[in-house]
Amino acid sequence: MTAFPEKRILLIIGGGIAAYKTLELIRRLRERGIFVRVVMTEAAKKFVTKLSVESLTGSEVFDELFALTGDSGMGHIELSRDADLLVAAPATADLLAKMAQGLAGDLASTLLLATDKKILAAPAMNVRMWLHPATQRSVALLQKDGVIFVGPESGDMACGEYGLGRMSEPAGILTAIEHLLSGDMRLPLPGDLSDESAGPGSLKGRRVVITSGPTHEPIDPVRYIANRSSGKQGHAIAAAAAAAGANVVLISGPVSLADPFGVKTIHVETAQEMLTQVEAALPADIFIGVAAVADWRVAETSLAKIKKHPEETPALTLVENPDILAAIGRRSKDRPALVVGFAAESEKLQENAQAKLIAKNCDMIVANDVTEAGVLGGESNKVSLLTKQGKENLPLMTKQKVAARLIEKIAGMLGGNGQ
Ligand code: PMT
């Protein structure tokens, strides 16, 4: 755990049910020695109490625009000047709209306007509110202004709907905060994407769609078919692509990893859901299929938990899942310029990988030797990069290094260097 004892955060809590997760975020920030000063909107106080926040931060919570009494009489300016970073979590549709318009009718919006510090926003709202053109306009304006977003994510919502709009988990927001506080990472601001002066190995201005992790195929409400993929390789590739300046959409199966910083991450469970989200994320310049998609699913998922019978073992009938990589590789409309697949093989590595390159109409296949201990689920990987032109064998290396080399190679194939 990295400590940041000198750092100060001004945390603005908006009025949404996700505010309960912000309490956990405060706890984790405090564990890292970060001083957290909190401002709550009126609506936020309907979801969490000032008392719980004050108990966690150990300091006063601010909520009144006209109650601040700094030496200069400009308390709100001092509050935001004092911080290294402003974090809005949950950032509601209302808060985002006020920020985008430069409104300053309450303490939270005033502080967000009266700052020259970086602002990280963790949106949380109902899926329809998030997808509404008014919210999307606010987000686009704020991104142009340099506001950095973490999330939102897909999932079940408190309102009973399912979709994009859930606030990122505290671990994901924390990762983003740590990157910003250490200042060690280029921030992938969409405003940068219009800059065509891409450097060597760069993916500036490119849209990349990546799948990662396993899929879970339900048998009944409690059981599912799965595999040992952890998502570490796919997530590392998404992070490397974002660091190279790409606009990245990561479609992830169930994993226990934080969403990579600067990457729009969509969470799915099954192969069919993954295909739907991949298709929805197109058009893109590059598709990279890293996920270990289950080849089969159960023909009929049981709605009730299947019971044990003394004389009968249930027989599962399997049907083939859609092949996402092949579907993207063979598209006639909106086929990405570069389609990259993986081949996880336990025998005849090169031969099988070569066959997948052709059969799935890919531009590159990453031949992955999964007999190497620790590749599935572990920290390192051993791969060869196969194209129709030739092959590059890489030694056993960390998944981050594999990701960096793959992204460099892809940038080269699209016209930069790095071939
Ligand atoms: O997640 P980690 O623990 O870090 O491990 C990384 C990894 C070993 C899972 C990864 O590096 C890897 O090899 N991924 C591909 C896994 C796989 O399913 O391979 P495959 O040979 O069965 O499939 C070939 C390609 O088709 C893959 O790009 C796969 O994403 C795709 N596919 C397969 C089946 C299917 N129904 N749809 C697909 O898109």
Image (tube, rainbow, N blue to C red):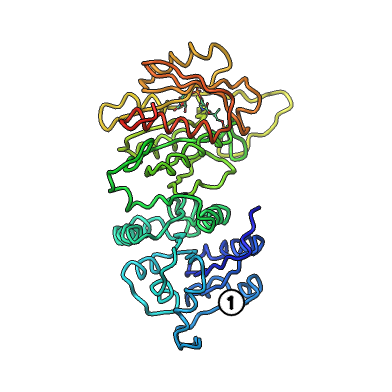
Q: Is residue 227 above or below residue 160?
A: above
Residue 294 horizontal side relative to residue 146, left or right: right
SS category of the residue bearing label 1: helix
Q: Position of residue 167 (x, y in %)?
A: 49, 57
Considering the image in quadrants, where does the C terminus appear? top left
Q: Position of residue 393 (x, y in %)?
A: 50, 19
Mark 1, ligand 1, within 8 Å: the answer is: no
The residue lying at 43 percent from left, 47 percent from top is: 264
Q: Is residue 345 above or below residue 309?
A: above
The residue that disc 1 covers is 50
Answer few, some or many: residues within 10 Å of disc 1's Cα (few below 14, many 20 plus, some between 14 and 19): some
Quarter of the rendering containing residue 356: top left
Most foreground residue, 350 or 42: 350
Residue reaching furthest right?
A: 310
Residue reaching furthest left?
A: 333
Q: Position of residue 173 (x, y in %)?
A: 53, 56
User: How many badges with numbers are in the image?
Assistant: 1
The residue lying at 32 percent from left, 23 percent from top is: 330
Quarter of the rendering containing residue 61: bottom right
Q: Residue 207, can we see it?
A: no
Most foreground residue, 260 or 226: 260
Most foreground residue, 381 or 284: 381
Q: Position of residue 246 (x, y in %)?
A: 38, 42
The residue lying at 37 percent from left, 33 percent from top is: 411
Q: Residue 368, can we see it?
A: yes
| Three-letter code, disc 1 | Lys
